[in-house]
Amino acid sequence: MWQAICDDFYLCFLKATGDGSPRAMYLLRGLGVTIEVALAAIVLGLFIGFLVAVVRSSHNKYGYFSFLNAVSKVYLTIIRGTPMVVQLLITYYIILKSVDSKVLIAILAFGINSGAYQAEILRAGIESIDPGQMEAGRALGLSYWRTMLKVILPQAVRNVLPALGNEFIVLMKDTSIVGYIALIDLAKGGDIIRSQTYSVYLPYLTVAAVYLMLVMTFTWLLGKLERHLRSTGADPVHNDS
Amino acid sequence: MSETLLKIENLRKSFGNLEVLKGLSTEIRKGEVVVMIGPSGGGKSTFLRCMNLLEQPTGGSIIFDGIDIVRADDSTKNRVRSEMGMVFQHFNLFPHLTILENITLAPRLVRGASAASAEKKAMELLELVGLEDKAKAYPQQLSGGQKQRVAIVRSLAMEPKVMLFDEPTSALDPEMVGEVLDVMKDLAKHGMTMVVVTHEMRFACDVATRVLFLEGGRIAAEGTPAKIFGESHDGRLGEFLSKVHVGTDFRDKVKAELFDILRDHEVSEDELARLKDLLVRGTPAK
């Protein structure tokens, strides 16, 4: 029994494949792709999310940006209304057909998708800030944008950190579908090993375990960030002024 | 006659179909302490917030520094706001910044002050209100009275020409009201032009140079504290004042002043009785 597991381990991870490297390299390189796509998509999503959130909340409260607001609403509806897989396939086969790098295509597709969700999360954060904060900023002579940047957004982000963290975790796991466009990430790497060795336990269970560790590490880091912000006393959620 | 800082003419403000300000006109002169009193919904806060354009008036004009700020462009409005300080009922300190950062934010961003000079000024102001040891604390570590005093200092850091106070003590526990009013009295003594919306009648009596009674979106009565609080009034003002306790200090002051004036005059028994009644009960005998 033990011998069977060892044999399996050797077959799945240590045996050399076509290019001379051990099969485990599928997982290692795949992990690299997963992290690369997830991180870059999170950053792209944050960028898009901020812009759209500010446009939407400014329009809701003060009527600015009518055109951009309409564009944003269309963007949000379409992105949130279609499955990620379909968006990835459309991006790969239609929109960015001429782009060579699959990694880049994946980053763009996931980034644009995540941006929509982050936009709504950030908008909720912005709109939950007491209107008195904007009034105080403006009463001091700060422009709307300065106040938004220095007063509102710092508080909004702190308030929605848990929800944003959640979105990042979902994004990390969503990247596992890039196998659909034949990009080898962690999940696809495990699948390839299974297809070569016909052994199912080790490849899939290992892949699951690695994803789990990724998410747990990220959750721990997020918790540290939240604790750090709270310990500086700058915790708007628990402020009762 | 000191210079006029704000000249408000026929100011109107509607929220949708509801007309809250129905044509107000007044002048705020340098060094004045104008206190606005009146029933809720009468337009006091709206009027105050129109002065620094937190609310956009729907009609009329406000001349500040020679320009009609109601029709000014955004950057002018921002500049105007930086020259008017505002203190809010709920303090509105920035919770993610320390007290020192709260105070230095605007001078650094709007006036381009260096961090060092802004901090120096902030510490000087904090010392004036006795809160210099709280400079590195965060707002939620302070009591209500301390927060409001910091809010006042934050506005003062911009060296405004006029300070607007929107019910500054209404959200405070009674024992903290005094410390904030003391700061405001100090400000008035040093010649700051102030427009105050408040329910603290004693403050109005002691410090105001002029009292405005706003009701139904209009200035229903206007005058010195002595006139508004000392005389009897009919109608809405009378009704309002009768429900409000002015306190005996004012009557004592009026009494002393009157006796001074009347010392060498002949007063009939009748007149004396009426005067006594007025001073004791606050309303003339019927």
Image: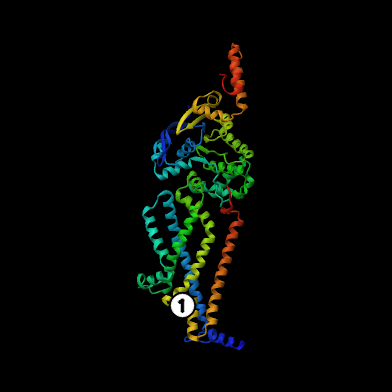
Q: Position of residue A113 (x, y in %)?
A: 43, 65
Residue in the foreground of this view, choosing between B30 and B46: B46
Residue plotted at (48% across, 56% down):
A124
* Residue B231 vertical placement versus A47 (above, below): above
A94 left or right of A133?
Answer: left
Residue in the foreground of this view, choosing between A125 and B28: A125
| The quadrant where residue A232 appears | bottom right
Question: Where's the C terminus of chain B, which quadrant?
Answer: top right
Chain at numbered mark 1: A
Q: Secondary structure at mark 1?
A: loop
Which residue is denoted by mark 1 in the rendering? A184
Residue plotted at (42% across, 55% down):
A56
Hey, what amino acid is under mark 1? Answer: Ile
Residue in the foreground of this view, choosing between A59 and B283: B283
Q: Position of residue B193 (x, y in %)?
A: 51, 34
Q: Mark yes or no: residue B113 visible.
A: no
Crowdedness near tag 1: few (<14), some (14–19) or many (≥20) residues, C-alpha within 10 Å: many
Q: Position of residue B72 (x, y in %)?
A: 39, 41
* Residue B148 vertical placement versus A41 (above, below): above
Q: Position of residue A189 (x, y in %)?
A: 49, 79
